[in-house]
Image (tube, grey):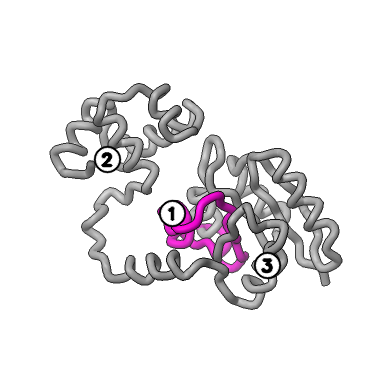
Amino acid sequence: MKLSVLIYEDNALLRESVGVMIQANPGLILEAAFENVLNVEAELRAYKPDLILMDIDMPGMSGIEAVQKIRRVNNQVPIIMLTVFDDNVHVFEALQAGASGYLLKKHISTKLFDAIDEVMEGGAPMSPSIARMVLASMHKPATENPYQLTAREKEILTSLSKGNSYKLIAAEFAISIDTVRTHIKKIYEKLQVHSQTEAVSKAIHEKLV
């Protein structure tokens, strides 16, 4: 029986090439491929995939947030994160959110099917450095991040505290202004503030940055 796969990747060329790989594998079937995760919960219910391939950095909502949403609906479906960088905080946060493992994009052509086999057998494809971060996190007191800000949210809050505009923040992190606005909206919600001044004041006062 073929395994059904959903792909979430905003890069059209990569999304298409991964889809071709999936379709060429006799043991897999590509259910659908999407450029964002804005409707991930509805798509999960509609397609009921056996496996999800999830990009981390996407417009509107990140893959990490999408994993959190998926896990509220389905705790079982394996999710392999697709990422450009090894040993980074975003991979770590994705695993904390409930991802099953990750695969570097530069290795997709050679290691995709090995990673799929591993995750479907109950394994967790990841580098030793990320595994060490996961283990180390178990020993950190929760009070270190009382507002549960993500790494990117902390970076953006720090940039805001330096007086940078949305445009400068977008350029600094190579993301769109709309993505910056989305992150800042989340930061305001988590800090329970309503303006940039309040957010920066609270961040400095409580040594969040």
Q: Is residue 155 magenta?
A: no
**According to the image, label 2 marks what residue?**
191
Could you tell me which quadrant the C terminus lies in? top left
* Residue pictured at 54% horizontal, 48% vertical: 56
N-term mark: 2 or 3: 3
* Residue pictured at 30% horizontal, 36% vertical: 157
Q: Nearer the viewer, residue 188 or 62?
A: 62
Q: Is residue 74 magenta?
A: yes
Mark number, residue 88: 1
Q: Nearer the viewer, mark 1 or mark 3?
A: 1
* Residue pictured at 47% horizontal, 61% vertical: 95
Label 1, secondary structure: give it. loop
Label 1 Cα crowd, 10 Å radius (few <14 / some 14-19 / many 20+): some
**According to the image, label 3 marks what residue?**
116
Query: Which amino acid lies under the numbered mark 1 shown in the image of this protein?
Result: Asn
- The boundaries of the magenta stretch are 72-100
Side of 39 relative to 71 (left or right): right
